[in-house]
Amino acid sequence: MAESITNRNEKWREELRQLHSTKQRTSLPRVKMPEVDPGYRVTCVDEVNQGLSVEQAVLESRRCLDCPDPGCVKGCPVANNIPGFIKNIERRNFSEALKVINETSVLPAVCGRVCPQEKQCEASCIYNKMKKQPVAIGHLERFVADFIRESERQQQNDDKTVRDDAASQSALPLSIKIAVIGSGPSGLAFAGDMAKRGYKVTVFEALHTFGGVLKYGIPEFCLPNEIVDYEIERLKKLGIEFVKDSFVGKTISYQELQALGFKGIYIATGAGKPRFMCVPGENLPGVMTANEYLIRLNLLDSQAYGKNSTSLAGKRVAVIGGGNTAIDAVRFALRMGAEKAMIVYRRSEAEMPARSEEIRHAREEGVEFMTLSNPVEYISDDSGFLKAMRLQKMELGEPDASGRRSPVAIPGAVEEIPVDLVVVSVGSLPNPPTSLPDLEMTRQGEIVVDNSSMKSSSPAIYAGGDIVRGPATVILAMGDGRRAANAMAEAFERRLQSLEL
Ligand SMILES: Cc1cc2nc3c(=O)[nH]c(=O)nc-3n(C[C@H](O)[C@H](O)[C@H](O)COP(=O)(O)OP(=O)(O)OC[C@H]3O[C@@H](n4cnc5c(N)ncnc54)[C@H](O)[C@@H]3O)c2cc1C
Ligand code: SF4
């Protein structure tokens, strides 16, 4: 673990460890996250998880044993100093806890909500070996970020706090202009780190709103927009310029960016290109991709019931897939009034890649899970609109390259199910901007980079997030942005020292 502002040998931590015995700590049950009742939550887009109170967070933090060789840190893709921030919660020093998290993570309110902790840090917590529920690391991370945000709001001193942050972290302003293409978590993390180093950063975003998938993909009932907007406001106060409706490769070219004096470019355009299954009938009205569907719901004020064209009142909706996107889509369908909302997934629930909490929430809300089923045809009515889907029943065979048991069709086992809307959510592909110099790409369209610096095959162009990895996670996208910022800044510093610039 890198040197942190708090380490295990500090006196306060030693004293804190001695306050309660291991037996006392491990006998505490995991604090349950308060949730909105399923019957009510399907009628609105209120956030489902309500957050821990101060007392609940402190109680949960007490469960953490401050392990000498913490497995949780090894399980975190960006090696957050997890016991370091949790022990600060236990001693009620929440601002210090946030500082510890911010050493490695720039969007804790987001990551605390959407990271798959059960497969990462929490999966490696020592409690699992004791056959007990792991420390609720994600809920504690979210608590810290939310607590500080709300305190700042209450004191009405946001401006001061951000100026203080900027003043304490920014280097002397430099005249070097850097362009970031895409305002998702990767672009935001990169932009923040470069601005703190004094670079003049401009973020170009194709859409009319900033945040990437955090805004147009993940619904408000999982991640409220105000959380993302708050983080973007903080970045603006660091001097970063945000330009919306600016599609690099269409409304502005690479050559124009160069002419405007941008000396470095970070590409973070994500993986928003939909993937199709090539099933007969997939082009019928009534079949759409998850991207199109979620953009309509998230960005077109669809939460205003009755005022829009996205109401699904009385409709039967099937979402094809088992990832986070599919579960978000199907839960959204219920909130838009769907009479029946189904997940159609070709393997069993155990193989679903979605976060387990999301699957549980979906089930509580009344989503029907049609597992071991795969669509083989969509059927239209006399007017050419979707009316049914034909599903091939599957069974599990040998494990495939992903280690999951592969689905095998059961001969002759096909059933027809009536449906009004099908949302295809079987993954997506990278969408690299056009008009850039010839970059080395994979066959799938991912930009090839050096893994440690995130530098592409073209000088001064770096890339990270889903455009490099294919569809992945928020924390990995952010980690790439931070690594790229480090490497690009070092490269500029070397050039400045040799007076090349
Ligand atoms: C519905 C959904 C739910 C998800 N749920 C989770 C979850 O619970 N947990 C988790 O960890 N991950 C989740 N993910 C994955 C996660 O959101 C992504 O891995 C992450 O957002 C990738 O970040 P990024 O910055 O690389 O790209 P993105 O977030 O995709 O942002 C890319 C941005 O670039 C813009 N852009 C594209 N081309 C151009 C261009 N030419 N010019 C200008 N701008 C451009 C796009 O409009 C977009 O705003 C989910 C994804 C989806 C779709
Ligand atoms: S492994 Fe679990 S108990 Fe140990 S430091 Fe990490 S969170 Fe705390």
Image (cartoon, rainbow, N blue to C red):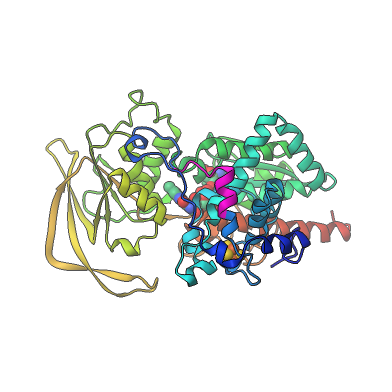
Percent coordinates x, y for residue 94 in the rendering: 67, 47
Q: Residue at x 67, y 63 (%)?
A: 17
Q: How many marks?
A: 0
Q: Residue at x 63, y 61 (%)?
A: 20
Farthest residue, direction bottom: 398
Residue 209 visible in this rendered orientation of the protein: yes
Is residue 490 inside the magenta stretch? no
Residue 264 visible in this rendered orientation of the protein: no
Q: Residue at x 73, y 61 (%)?
A: 15
Is residue 50 inside the magenta stretch? yes
Percent coordinates x, y for residue 385 in the rendering: 19, 38
Q: Residue at x 37, y 39 (%)?
A: 37
On the image, which quarter does residue 204 sit in?
top right
On the image, which quarter does residue 375 sit in?
bottom left
Q: Which residues are magenta?
A: 49-60
| Front-most of residues 22 and 150 | 22
| Front-most of residues 347 and 61 | 61
Determine whether, in the image, residue 392 is placed left or right of residue 455: left
On the image, which quarter does residue 414 sit in?
bottom left
| Front-most of residues 94 and 382 | 94
Q: Give the answer, above or below, for where 370 lies relative to 160.
A: below
Farthest residue, direction top: 307
Determine whether, in the image, residue 134 is placed left or right of residue 384: right
Percent coordinates x, y for residue 310 in the rendering: 33, 32
Percent coordinates x, y for residue 38 in the rendering: 34, 40
